[in-house]
Amino acid sequence: MTHGLDPTEEYDGSITVRLLDDERGTETHRCSSYEGAIELVKTHERRVTVAKIVDREGAVVFTSADADIDEWERVWNREKRRLSVHVEERECPYDSISCFADDLCVQCKIDTVQEQY
């Protein structure tokens, strides 16, 4: 019922969230997207020992023992946005790897504000 507009991406449910608990064992949930996996981790992270997100290739891309899910989500969204749009190349004078034309590093933002005054 898409009236000729087929989705450009399909998810086969192969993103997996593993919830490990010392007392109850391991629960495995298949998710149709990273957004769903992130929400599942946020919902259950307080009641389990460790929550993990495993990508389609079987690599662990997030583990709550090493990172905060909110911070990981911000980085994931930034990287997704960076990959999905053409971003003008920018050579940061401070050699910051997270400095983009549309998302300057802190030092470049400070320089921009100082230049205005």
Image (tube, rainbow, N blue to C red):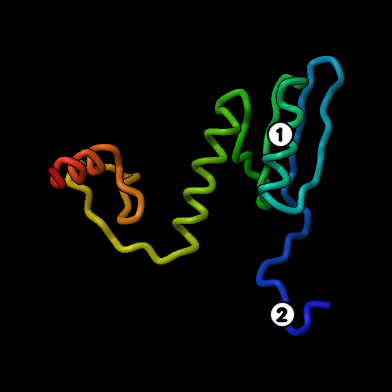
Could you tell me residue 24's position as x and y percent?
A: 87, 20
Badges 2 and 1: C-beta atoms under 8 Å apart?
A: no
Nearest to viewer (mark 2 / mark 1) = 2
Q: Going from the N terminus, do you reach mark 2 or mark 1 first?
A: 2
Could you tell me residue 17's position as x and y percent?
A: 74, 39
Measured along the vertical axis of the image, is residue 36 above or below residue 41? below
Report the amino acid beneath label 2: Leu
Q: How busy is the neighbourhood of tag 1: few (under 14 within 10 Å), some, or many (20 plus)?
A: many
**The C terminus lies in quadrant:** top left
> What is the spatial separation of the Cα atoms under label 2 and label 1, in whole angstroms?
32 Å
Mark number, residue 87:
none
Could you tell me residue 42's position as x and y percent?
A: 69, 32
Q: Quadrant of residue 2?
A: bottom right
Q: Extreme bottom residue here? A: 4
Instruction: Give the left or right position of residue 74, taking residue 41 as reference.
Output: left
**The N terminus lies in quadrant:** bottom right
Q: Extreme front residue here? A: 117
Label 2: state its secondary structure. Answer: loop
Q: Residue at x 76, y 21 (%)?
A: 48
Mark number, residue 41:
1
Q: Residue at x 66, y 51 (%)?
A: 57
Measured along the vertical axis of the image, is residue 84 above or below residue 79? below
Q: Which residue is mark 2?
A: 5
Q: Residue at x 32, y 52 (%)?
A: 100
Instruction: Give the left or right position of residue 96, taking residue 62 as reference.
Output: left
Report the amino acid beneath label 1: Val
Instruction: Give the left or right position of residue 15, taking residue 81 as reference.
Output: right
